[in-house]
Image (tube, helix red, strand yellow):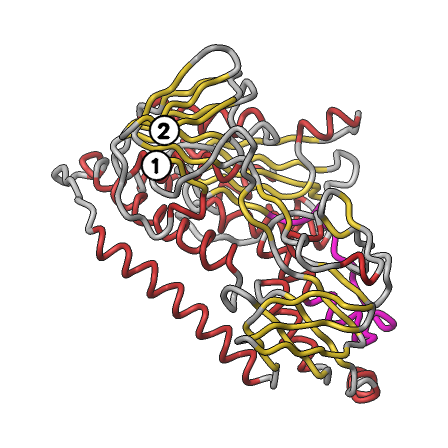
Amino acid sequence: MFWRVASALVSTRFVIIGGGPAGNTAATHAARLGAQVTLIERDIIGGAAHLWDCIPSKTMMATGGAMAFTRSIQGMGLEQQEAEVDLPGLQGRIADIQGRLQRNTIRLLESQGVRMLMGSARLVGPHQVEVVSEGVTEQIQADAILIATGSRPRIPEWCQPDGQRILTTRDCYPPKIFPTSMTVVGSGVTGVEFVHMFSSFGSNVSLVVSRQQVLPSKDPEVAAVLEDDFLRRGVRLLKGARATSIERHGDEVVVSCDDGRVVRSSHAVLAIGSVPNTNDLDLGTAGVHLDGGYVTINRHCQSNVAHIYAAGDVSGKLPLSSVASMQGRKVAEHVMGLHKVAHRHLDYDKAASAIFTEPEIADVGLAETEAFAEGRKIRVTKVPFSANPKALINNDSRGFVKIVSDPATGVVLGGSIVGRHAAELISVIALAVTANLTVSDIVESLLVHPGLSEALAEAAE
């Protein structure tokens, strides 16, 4: 059945605008299924948000985490060490990782026969895409089109970044210097990661928090652990303060808040979200509806125009590379008709996410606060890492594992983890949520001892 569907649609002309996780996954998967695929990218194959934002930031945080670890090894029976930043080495490491990932993506696309064009694209009709590549304009006919153009940092009217001292998130990679002091505006996922990053490298960091807790959309217990760590690091938290202006005065940056508080530092970075890259695509020419710049999609990632799809950040769903990749895969399958056979729809409520601070934070599925807000009956179990042998061996017992389950059936509904390797450990709970496993399934798994994963089984008891 699989190959009959693929061969029957072998002539499908599939044009993808955007070569990030959504676009390149859709391209390779559709090509394997027999589509004639053209992938158009204006910046970097692999995705600007992925290779210019995500990978460099996580690389810097890994290095910063290693530095922070050396400051605490005395508790492991070792003499105290103080690592110093090798800035050229770090810059080279970031470039090397970016290059490897991009080359791997290009090789995969080439191996599947995907045609790649570097240039800008726009729609000139429902089935026509115009591409300007190396000064040459070409019109491409398409049976199906995927919009996967990603997003860019949001810049408010009250701030004009200069790329030197007033920065967007994208201005920070690769690092040119490490500032003596830094004010981070925005306490969401990106903002707290920047706090972790710069404080690890020795900067005096202030964080402007518009609400009364960092990570306002997360579990308060999760946020509390992170706030405690920030305070231990000497981070200044300005809670309940909303930035209204950022101005540069010579070598000083002044951030003013709506409650009258003022923060002075050598640098400031805006981390207040992103906006979709749809403004230059002329989507209205094809009749595609937008909502705040995002393409409105159904569960198949189709826009209101059935053969035009959207995936990744422009779809307005969870802005995660993992979600974008899965959307791209589902789009390819839909374009090639595989939704007519056995097919699992993408459930955004079951997507795992992680924040690469120290300690790491990860969650998946139904949150405790969300369940209470909806009036749902749930069972919540929590185990601190302070009771876990491997955490004590690692000299890092911060955080906990929390599992949310159905009290009647035992089915795992969600969970959150704060602590070392939380981003990896959450995979167990994510699998349980996706596969409708029960807490007994986790409890009865024979896990490694000593291991941090034992806390998962204990939390499932």
Work out whether 269 lies above or below 319: above
Decide which of 402, 179 is in the foreground and name it. 179
Instruction: Give the quadrant of residue 145.
Output: bottom right
Q: Is residue 204 left or right of residue 313?
A: left
Q: Residue at image x 86%, y 61%? A: 305
Q: Amino acid at mark 1?
A: Arg
- Of label 1 and label 2, which has the lower sequence position? 1
Q: Is residue 336 magenta?
A: yes
- Where in the figure is residue 162, as x and y percent of width and height? 40, 40
Residue carrying label 1 = 165
Give the extent of the magenta segment.
Answer: 329-352
Callout 1 environment at 10 Å: few (<14), some (14 to 19), or many (20+)? Answer: many
Residue carrying label 2 = 248
Instruction: Give the quadrant of residue 369.
Output: top right
Q: Amino acid at mark 2?
A: Arg
Q: Is residue 365 left or right of residue 108?
A: right
Mark 1 and 2 residues: CB-CB less than 8 Å, in contact?
yes
Q: Secondary structure at mark 2?
A: strand
Q: Residue at image x 21%, y 41%? A: 70
Which residue of the protein is positioned furthest toward the top in this rendering?
A: 260
Callout 2 environment at 10 Å: few (<14), some (14 to 19), or many (20+)? Answer: some
